[in-house]
Image (cartoon, helix red, strand yellow):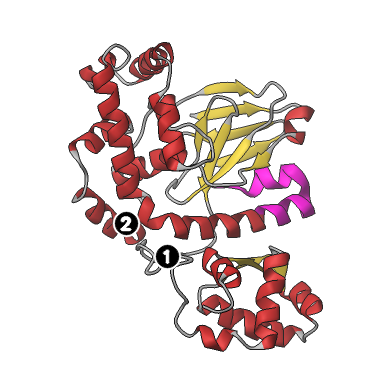
Amino acid sequence: MVYRIHFTVQDLARTRVAEAPMPLHELELAARALQSRCRPARLDAWRRRARGQLSVQARAVLALMPAVGCSPGFLSPARAGGVEELLEQVRSTPREQVRAGVLATARCRPSLPVWARRLADDASLFAELCTGLGHLHACLLAPYWGRFTEQLAVDRTLRLQQLLTGGVEDLLTRANPQWMRWKAPVLEVRMVSGADRDLYLGGEGLLLVPSMFGARAAVTEGRPHAVSYPACPSQRPGELTPLACVPGQGRVPGVSMLLGRTRTVVLTTIAEHEGCSTKELAARAGIAPASASEHATVLREAGLICSLRHRNSVLHSLTPLGLALLNAPEDV
């Protein structure tokens, strides 16, 4: 079964990749991953840690976000912003929108908890659910947000290269070939839930949303219509663990070796030219390609940049830790 997303010329022109993380959208994908068995080598340790920390309210949210199947859209808007700001927007959801969201979910999920049908009329119950949403974010996403931000920066670099070299159709073809297939003018998204339907974008375009936890492809209808896909699927990350240090809270070990003039120029060049190739980096920094590659390796091992192979090139982007280093006061 597939989701068929129909494009016009205007839709192709307005299709883009998300510029920033979308915390509540990613939270839903994390909640689904928590309850599935996908990617055990990467996620099982994360699952064990998370399950031991879940509050009663957070478990109630999980009941509305199953491993497979629909969930109320008002809980996971595809919007960027601060977590508290987005949670406040959820708390302010009009009752009629809550009722419509629950009813739509109940139609495709007969197993929806009985208490969910009271959400629109029971303010106390709805407040508890919103509290649980905050708890769930603190447990599932907050410790890993810096890592996801790094992944997003690397993925955007890759998608930009695809867009520049092959256009929007190449971007749609290569974003997630295992689950998404471009058959002009339709993007077919294979759905584990068995959903089979047509979606017409109406000239508004499609938002592509890279995800740390989404293992497949998920379609979100709304304004804008969005499709999530795994960020940097060609990379093979190890077990998901919290970051050992927080960007901006101190200097990284071994930072003294980064204070040399040439390496500082290389780091600054990457910061000013996100997604530059090693060849471009060498030209802009005024050094030999072999030297640029060597310095990039040291910076990458120190966690200050991310590198991603694209065709015959290696593309470099700054990490939050690298940005924190460049922005640190000179007397620190």
Where residue 186 sits in the image (x, y, percent)? 67, 30
Residue beneath the point at 68% across and 87% down:
261
Instruction: Decide if residue 125 is on the left or right side of residue 324.
Output: left
Does 162 lie within the magenta span?
Answer: yes
Residue type marked 2: Pro
Q: Nearer the viewer, residue 110 or 274?
A: 274
Q: Which residue is mark 1?
A: 246
Secondary element at image label 2? helix
Instruction: Decide if residue 63 is on the left or right side of residue 291.
Output: left
Where residue 250 sits in the image (x, y, percent)? 44, 73
Q: Nearer the viewer, residue 241 or 195?
A: 241
In the rendered image, is residue 274 in sight?
Answer: yes
Does 164 lie within the magenta span?
Answer: yes
In the rendered image, is residue 194 in sight?
Answer: no
Secondary element at image label 1? loop
Where residue 75 sits in the image (x, y, percent)? 40, 29
Q: Which residue is mark 2?
A: 40
